[in-house]
Image (cartoon, rainbow, N blue to C red):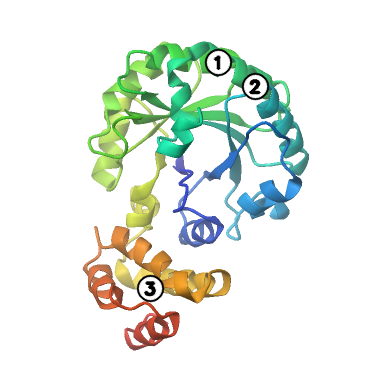
C-alpha cells in the first residue's frame, strides 16, 4: 500500500490547516512548516509554536503524525537545534533542502544548498548524530538550482549523511512552482540511491498521482498544493471518498471558525480566500463562494455571507 504524505507548505499548511486536512483523512504522516535555524539555539517555544502537535505526542487532533523540519546551512547549529528538538520526541525530523523562496535562498537556505553536495553531507551527518535511531530522519530536496545536473550527487551526499528516506520535488529552484514537475528525473535519483525515495510535485488528481508513481518509480507520494485544492484527494486515491463539495463544507466551516479564533479580523478573510482560490480548481461551489467573498473585507460580513450560503 502506498503511503500518502502531507508536504510542509510555508504560509499554507499551518497547524490549523493541518488539523483540517488530516481530519478529512487519508494521510500516513506529514511535515510541518520549517523552523529557520541561524547562528543560535532556538528556544523551546519556537519549536512548539511552529509545531504545536509536539504537545500532543507529535500528532494532529486526528492522530496523524507530524514531523518537524529544520532549515539552515550551518552544520553545528543545525545539530544543536536538532539536539533540542528531539527532547520533544517529534514523530520525525526532516531537513529542508528545497525551499525556493527568494529570502530563504538569499540567506543560503533551502534550495540554495543544492550546489554544494559536500555541505549537504556535512549538515545531514551532523544532524544524524543528534537524532536517535528510533526517530525517523528524512530530508526534502529539489532537483537542483537552475538545472538537475547535480541531483544525483546531492541525493547521494544526503544518503551518505544518514537519512532514512529522501523526498524529492521534481522541479529546480528556478522552476519555482511552474508546471510541469519532472517526475522522470525523480526516477533517475531513485535509481542512484539505496534509500526509499518519496516523490513530490504537481499532483492534483488521482490520475496525476498514478502517473507520478509510474514516471518516478516511487510508490509513496507527498501532496503539496494539491492537498489544499482537493482535500479529498488522499481518500480518492485510496478509493474511500465518494462525495464532493458537501463533504468539504464542514471542513470549510471548521477552518473559518479556527481562523476567527486565531487571526485578527482584518486578516481573517484573506486566509479563507487563499484556500478558496485553490479549492476552486476542483469545486465550482468554491469558485462561486470565492467570487462572493472577494470584495468583502470585514470578518463579520464574511460570517453573515457564510451563514447565508449554508457553510456555517
The residue to which callout 3 is attached is: 249
Mark 1 secondary-structure assignment: helix
Mark 3, Cα crowd under 10 Å, few <14 / some 14-19 / many 20+, is some
Picture coordinates of residue 78, whole percent (x, y): 66, 28
Asked whether, in this view, residue 20 is left or right of residue 306, the answer is: right
Element type at marker 3? helix
Which residue position is annotated with label 1?
Answer: 119
Quadrant of residue 82 within the rendered picture = top right
Residue 180 seen in this snapshot: yes
- Report the quarter where the N terminus lies: top left
Apparent side of residue 296 relative to residue 136 in the rendered image (left or right): left
Residue visible at 51% across and 70% down? 259
In contact (CB < 8 Å): disc 1 and disc 2: yes
Q: Earlier in the sequence, mark 3 or mark 2?
A: 2
**Residue 269 screen position, x and y as percent:** 40, 72
Q: CA distance from mark 3 to mark 2?
A: 45 Å
- The picture places residue 186, in percent across and down from the top left corner, at 34, 23
Amino acid at each position: 500500500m502506498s503511503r500518502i504524505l502531507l508536504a510542509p507548505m510555508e504560509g499554507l499548511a499551518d497547524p490549523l490547516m493541518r488539523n483540517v486536512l488530516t481530519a478529512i483523512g487519508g494521510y500516513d504522516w506529514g511535515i510541518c512548516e520549517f523552523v529557520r535555524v541561524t547562528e543560535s539555539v532556538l528556544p523551546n517555544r519556537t519549536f512548539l509554536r511552529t509545531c504545536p502537535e509536539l504537545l500532543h505526542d507529535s500528532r494532529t487532533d486526528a492522530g496523524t503524525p507530524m514531523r518537524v523540519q529544520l532549515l539552515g546551512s550551518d552544520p553545528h547549529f543545525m545539530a544543536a537545534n536538532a539536539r533540542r528538538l528531539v527532547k520533544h520526541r517529534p514523530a520525525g525530523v526532516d531537513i529542508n533542502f528545497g525551499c525556493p523562496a527568494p529570502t530563504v535562498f538569499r540567506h543560503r537556505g533551502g534550495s540554495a544548498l543544492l550546489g554544494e553536495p559536500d555541505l549537504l553531507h556535512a549538515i545531514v551527518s551532523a544532524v544524524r548524530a543528534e537524532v536517535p535511531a528510533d526517530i525517523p530522519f528524512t530530508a526534502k530536496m529539489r532537483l537542483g538550482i537552475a538545472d538537475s545536473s547535480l541531483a544525483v550527487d546531492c541525493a547521494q551526499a544526503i544518503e551518505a549523511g544518514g537519512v532514512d528516506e529522501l523526498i524529492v520535488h521534481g522541479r529546480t529552484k528556478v522552476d519555482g512552482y511552474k508546471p510541469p514537475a519532472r517526475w522522470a528525473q525523480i526516477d533517475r535519483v531513485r535509481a542512484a540511491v539505496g534509500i526509499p525515495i518519496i516523490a513530490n510535485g504537481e499532483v492534483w488528481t488521482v490520475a496525476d498521482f498514478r502517473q507520478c508513481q509510474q514516471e518516478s518509480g516511487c510508490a509513496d507520494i507527498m501532496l503539496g498544493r494539491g492537498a489544499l485544492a482537493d482535500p479529498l484527494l488522499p481518500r480518492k486515491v485510496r478509493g474511500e471518498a465518494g462525495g464532493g463539495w458537501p463533504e468539504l463544507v464542514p471542513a470549510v466551516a471548521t477552518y473559518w471558525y479556527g481562523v476567527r479564533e486565531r487571526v485578527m479580523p482584518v486578516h481573517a478573510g484573506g486566509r479563507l480566500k487563499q484556500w478558496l482560490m485553490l479549492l476552486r480548481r476542483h469545486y465550482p461551489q468554491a469558485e462561486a463562494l470565492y467570487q462572493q467573498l472577494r470584495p468583502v473585507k470585514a470578518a463579520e460580513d464574511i460570517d453573515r455571507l457564510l451563514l447565508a450560503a449554508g457553510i456555517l
